[in-house]
Image: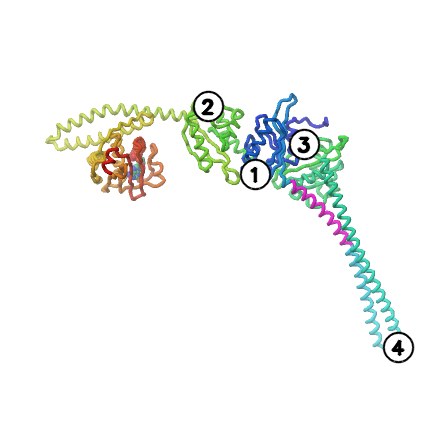
Amino acid sequence: MDPSLPSISEQERYRIIADLAPMMIWMTDADKRFNFFNVRWLHYTGRSATEEYGKGWTTGIHPDDMQHWEESYSTAFDRRQELKVEFRLQRENGHYGFLLTKAVPIYSKDGTFRGYVGSSMDLEDLAHGIAIAKEQALNEELAASNEELVAINEELGRAQDELQQLNSSLEEKVSARTAELTKSEAEAQSLNEELSASNEELSAMNEEMTALNEELFATNEELHESQDHLQHANEALNQSKLQLEEALEATQHSEQLFKSIALNIPGSMIIVIDRNYHYLALEGDLMVRMGYDSKNYVGKHPLETGQPERYEAARPLYDRVLSGEQFSVERKASTGEDFLVHLVPLRNKDAEVYAGLVIALDITDIKQAQEKSAKLAAIVESSDDAIISKNLESVIASWNESAERMFGYTAEEIVGDTIYRLIPDDRKHEEEHIISRMRNGERVEHFETQRLTKDGRLIDVSVTVSPIRDSEGRVIGASKIARDITEKKLDEQRKNDFIGMVSHELKTPLTSLTALLQVLQGKLRTSPDAFIPGALDKANVQIKRMTGMINGFLNLSRLESGKIMIDIYPFDLNELIREVVAETAMTVSSHVIRFDDGRAVMVDADRDKIASVLSNLIGNAVKYSPKGKSVEVKSIISNDTVTVSVRDEGIGISTQDQERLFDRYYRVESSQTRHISGFGIGLYLSAEIIERHEGRIWIESEPDRGSTFYFSLPVAPFQSTNSA
Ligand code: ADP
């Protein structure tokens, strides 16, 4: 080791080497959990390290290869043997790549087993990289022979030009002679002679031309020959190049190797410089984006490429690497992209640095994802709610601070473990239900339940669980937000107890008041003062209303504390309806309430409770419809059930409100209902009462057209035989 190297931890050095490697590297701990993936791996799967940790990455294994992987991995791991396995893994583009994977166990100095380190190579990528390198070499040879061809062509052109000139000077001479001929007859003779002379000259020239043509022909043949030579030379060159490449690949230490690495790693560039800063190699698809045009830089000094600023900026880095330092820096391009640049000194046999290797990787996507997840992580960490994520096997993948506060486990203690640790025995089935909803892509909202803390306490929580999807929309896990509602539950309990106590206390004086009033009514019915019987009737109506309300509150508090009792005995439901209708009619003069009397319908039920359901439904029908409208009550037997309906011609209820109508304290908020008083507990209680009778309650309604409330109850057994 070079003592001038800065001291980096062993782990860090592993990481750098792993990130430099042309293949995907991973590591596990001694418990089969994956705890490291190099940059190349993350590029390949397009996922973050946190997603991949533990068993996270295995969600990308092709389902058909899963069993094979698990068996090979477990067997090798348990026996501490070398692992060799092939499987398909999903790449960031969604396609499956075929991975050749090898791994070996690692031990610390004292012989303790520390886990596995493995490497994976995509078979297709490997083949692709080699093919590109070969093609590149061929292209270079072809370009060279093309240049030679161009030179020969130029020579040819020049010879043709000379010929052309010769021809035109000949023509000029002929025309000059002809002109002279016409000038003087006397000169004709001599001219004729001259002409014949020039004719001779011409024929001589013609001969010259023929000779020249022959020469040209010969040149052409030579050209062909030299082309053939070239072809051979090219082939020979190719051959030796291939041999060279193979040799270089074998030595693992040459620029050529890095060249092919660069071609293999998408979003990368590799530069190799010698001790005088001359480029030895410059490759990779990032070249143009990083400002190196496609000119051939090899053999040149950076200053010769006309980018002095770039050289000035890079020089200190070059000096460091050439002095033997291995390091990495991050750089942001003016275009906003992020690059991770590794600088590695290359040493010869005698350990002298003979060149510097610069590897630049485009990490823009990773950076952005990191920033995004850092923001998200900050939000998650600062939340007061416990935020937990898990995969579809219920294995916990992340755990925030509030989760730690709420459940007592630290992230280290529980990540990688099952969520069942938090679920009390009698609620284990809830998790199966939640996971099956996740698989269907559904959410579970505000689900109130109980969970177990590390120290064995049961806490009340409200959980909302949403599916987590991968980039293709497939559900791969779930995120869970849990809120501790123990305090809220206690508050509710206190409120309930208070309501229960107050209504109970109010009931006693009210009962005496009712009794007194009835005595008075009896005594004063025949009073000569007509006002007295009327006033007593009205007082009676008001006391009945008040008793109804107080009973409602009392029932509510009993229901909440689980103390409501259903007192079942057989009675005639139609008779009860008649009674309630008559009683309501006595106090209501604004509406017509109709009930078509039928024959007796016996039910096994709590008569008082069913009476309160009926009076609530009929009371609401009156309350929520304008004066003068009628309310119609019906009971219909079909098979073994009797269905009671209460129909009004009132304001109606929207579909949206219908969904929550039977919730505790729910009241429709609208201009029509604002002036109508109520507590929103009548329908809640009615629904609970009907449910406890194994009956059903529902509604059909249209805004402004009126509503019909239904409930059905099982008919008492002897009754149904009678009616059959
Ligand atoms: P309350 O009437 O005391 O508010 P309920 O539980 O009986 O409580 O009813 C809940 C809500 O349902 C009411 O506030 C009202 O908005 C709506 N509602 C009930 N019955 C009818 C009806 N027949 N027509 C229109 N709205 C109704």
Q: Which residues are magenta?
A: 126-151
Question: What SS does tag 3 mark?
Answer: strand
Nearest to viewer (mark 2 / mark 4): 2
- For marks 3 and 1, the one nearer the N-term is 1
Report the residue at 59% width, 40% height from top: 97
Q: Is residue 128 magenta?
A: yes
Residue holding disc 1: 90
Quadrant housing residue 89: top right
Query: Which amino acid, by three-letter code, is at mark 1?
Result: Gln
The quadrant the C terminus occupies is top left
Left or right, 564 with reference to 597:
right
Q: Residues within 10 Å of mark 2 (few under 14, many from 20)?
A: some
Looking at the rendered structure, the secondary structure element under dot 4 is: helix
Residue at 83%, 74% in the rendered image: 178
Closer-to-camera residue (122/267):
122
Q: What is the C-alpha distance between the residues marked 2 and 4?
A: 134 Å
Report if residue 82 is visible in the image.
yes
Looking at the image, tell me whether mark 3 or mark 4 is earlier in sequence order.
Answer: 4
Q: CA distance from mark 3 to mark 4?
A: 97 Å
Instruction: Determine which of the numbered discs, if any, sits on residue 480 in the image.
Output: none
Which residue is under mark 4?
Answer: 189
Quarter of the rendering occupied by the N terminus: top right
